[in-house]
Amino acid sequence: MPQENNYNLSITAEELQTATQALQTFVNTLRPHLANLTADSRRELPKLGPRTLDFVLKAREYASLNPELAPVFLSTELFDADLAGLETLNTLQRTLQPIAEAIDDSILLAGSEAYQAALIYYRGVKTAADSNQPSAKTIRDDLSARFPNTRRANNNETGATIEEEGSTLA
């Protein structure tokens, strides 16, 4: 099986430095304004999905049109501030999401190709070890630790060693 090369990152040190500095500026600008929740806090909070957002927007509109129905402890100013913040954060997320997904895709592709290259090398080392080439058995044994379900058995007819890789390749 030939080695695939569908992706090859070619970014200069200067481009990486520029991007890193821009991201650091972005993080430094937003960090003071963002929340960090614990896993428990995230689970306990009511969630705002598309249908719930529609409810929230209708409720705010009704509160505007019928302020006499709002409880005295409801601050419409804070309500409006939360909605404005939500809109700003959604805009930032929509801007970042495509690049974050592209980075995730690129990591997946580069990692997959590197893993495939390692498997090609490993198969070559196994073949070399079966041919008693120097150092091959040591390398094969070290690399085979990646496959804990691999079993080695002697083939009764030829006396050759057979390796079967388990299903834990991920």
Image: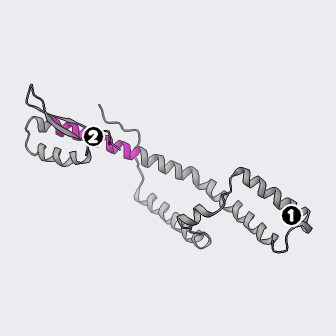
Q: Considering only order in the chain, which callout, 2 or 1, is on the residue closer to the N terminus?
A: 1
Mark 1 — residue?
63
- The answer to whether 17 is drawn above or below residue 95 in the figure is below
Q: Secondary structure at mark 1?
A: helix
In which quadrant of the rendered image does the N terminus lie? Answer: top left
Mark 2 — residue?
119
Magenta residues: mostly which secondary structure? Answer: helix
Q: Position of residue 61 (x, y in %)?
A: 85, 59
Q: Secondary structure at mark 2?
A: helix
**In the rendered view, does 23 fall on the left or right side of 161?**
right
Residue contact at pointers 1 and 2, CB within 8 angstroms: no
Q: Quadrant of residue 158?
A: top left
Q: Quadrant of residue 26?
A: bottom right
Give me the C-alpha separation between circle 1 and circle 2: 63 Å
**In the rendered view, does 4 fall on the left or right side of 61?**
left
Q: Position of residue 92 (x, y in %)?
A: 63, 59
Q: Amino acid at mark 1?
A: Ala
**In the rendered view, does 65 fall on the left or right side of 135?**
right
The answer to whether residue 19 is magenta is no
- Residue at image point 42% right, 43% down: 109
The answer to whether residue 124 is magenta is yes
Residue range (magenta): 109-127
Q: Position of residue 164 (x, y in %)?
A: 23, 35
- The answer to whether 41 is drawn above or below residue 101 in the figure is below
Q: Position of residue 37 (x, y in %)?
A: 56, 67
